[in-house]
Image: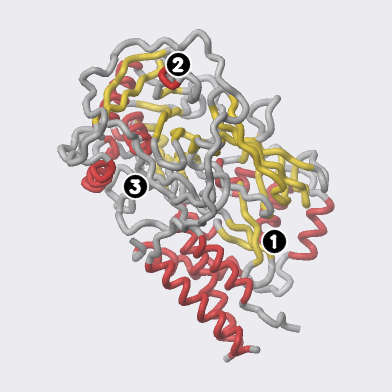
Amino acid sequence: MRHPTPYLPAAALLAIAIAAPSSTALAYKQTMTCNESGIYACEAGETALPVYWPQRCIVYHINESGTSDTDNDAAFEAIQQSFAQWSEPSCTNLEVSFGGFTNEDEVRYNQSNPSSNVNVVVFRDDIWPHSSGVLALTSVTFQPRTGEIFDADIELNTAEYRFSTTDNRLRVGIDVANTVTHEAGHFFGLDHSSVRESTMYATAPSGETSKRDLHEDDIEGICAIYSADTSSSDDSCAGAPVGYFEKPLNTSISSGNTSSSGVCSTTAVSSRTPSPLHALASIGLLALAAITIRRR
Amino acid sequence: MTNLLHRVAWLLAIGLFGAILATSSPASATIVLKLDTAAMSDTASSIVMGRVEATRSYWERGRIVTEIDLRVALPIKGLQETGAVVTVRQFGGRVDELAQLVPGTPQFSVGEQALVFLETVAEDLPPVVVGMAQGKYHLAVGPDERLWAVRNLDNLSLAVFEETASGERMMRLIDASAVAESNALPLAVLLSEVAHDLKRSARPIPDALRERLDADLNPSGHDFTTDFKALGPRLDRAQEVTP
């Protein structure tokens, strides 16, 4: 015996899929504050917003331990070049400053003492604390109601994989500059791009090093977030401190829930931007419903 | 004619569902080794199917940690028993006015049914999902009224290692669309793959899983995996025309 409404499950699946957040119409994309569901679900009254650094001068540090995988000087130079790429386009007022080395080796955000935080790039030579198989990972701390980024850190899994800095394509294992340039894009708030040649595209040819440099689409993306035409409260890295960043002796960081609590309105706001595919899916949903009714 | 309409509607639904999932969900990417079912089965210390009963996020030494409780409905590998609660741990989440995004971590919602491959990264801590979002399947009723296993890898860059002609080991990144056909498959197919992997590695197949396979595996004889493979080019085209 047939189920009386054989297409309803399919329709339900389509509805679930349609309810998922969609891609934007642009090639580059920005990372958003929240999703429709899951642990990053938008709360009532919240709209998904792009994440961004509120200041234009962004300082990062490199963990002094480096890695045993490759020459440390070369690895450190590769990281600095990777970050510098993102502030070079003339259409952006983003300034990126290497603040020096640090003994800070933890990815963390101290709410009670924000000035003690450091944006760090760290090689994990000994223990990789995440799922096995992860090569590189960027963690971004932000305000979910505004999208303001407070802290971002990049971890490279040298415990399980070999990284290198060589220009010899045949000897490239995992290229430090290629990887960090890509991860730094996420550090600044960019998501994947649909442009194949871009640094922020998810696919790369074998042994590639081309993501060391920015593509036109990457430049368009970074300039959309940090346009040279906009001003900000802190537009220059001229006074930014440079030097060794000593991990604070008192490393106790608040545990448990944060003290602040948000005020929620009761209006649910959709963050979804309709796309042609979603429109097509809607048509498909209607067609399935029509067929179901006709079969009855 | 009616059967043809029926079949076309199913294929349309499956194709659109896969295509939409592959183009949805804005998030950043984490670079992670591509793992097939066999590799995940080997890596996993436990594999369970169950219902998400609770999630909680909290601060731990400057990081937001999220724990997910799953009530086990079907223990597949490991020591868990039916009805037990398994806690899964992952970095990232939201606590009031701060969020920490760790791209590539799987998403869990209370009430959803899921199948997860779990590994232990620290002896004194709950397990994590194998291969980040690769190791978590959301379960949903599919167009054929059976359970389907669906996963979302949009925020992952998958890495594969290949040998060059000169014998060098090279890394290549692929995106989730390259593995679209493994991102939505009948649960029975996934379970049979896992059972095959357990058998290959001389591990016991739990009675509950064996019974499940006998009851569920493709009673109609229809090969939906073949349907997905046939839809592959169509999915690719759909993705290319999506802005």
Query: Residue B157 sits in which quadrant?
Result: top left
Q: Is residue B103 above or below residue B239?
A: above
- Residue A68 visible: no
Residue pushed farthest bottom? Answer: B1
Q: Is residue B19 above or below residue A189?
A: below
Q: Residue B170's x, y, as percent?
A: 40, 37
Residue A201 is marked as 3
For label 1, the residue is: B188
Q: Please tell me if label 3 and label 1 are on a single chain.
A: no
Q: Is residue B24 above or below residue B199?
A: below
Badge 1: few (under 14), some or many (20 or more) residues near its Cα, within 10 Å? Answer: many
Q: Please tell me if label 2 and label 1 are on a single chain.
A: no
Residue A104 is marked as 2
Amino acid carrying label 1: it is: Ala
Between marks 3 and 2, how big is the CA–CA gap? 31 Å
Identity of the residue drawn at 33% across and 44% down: A200
- Residue B236 visible: yes
Q: Residue A240's x, y, as percent?
A: 27, 18
Badge 2: few (under 14), some or many (20 or more) residues near its Cα, within 10 Å? Answer: many
Query: Residue A86 sits in which quadrant?
Result: top left
Q: Tell which of A134 and B110 is nearer to you.
A: B110
Q: Tell which of B141 and A117 is nearer to you.
A: A117
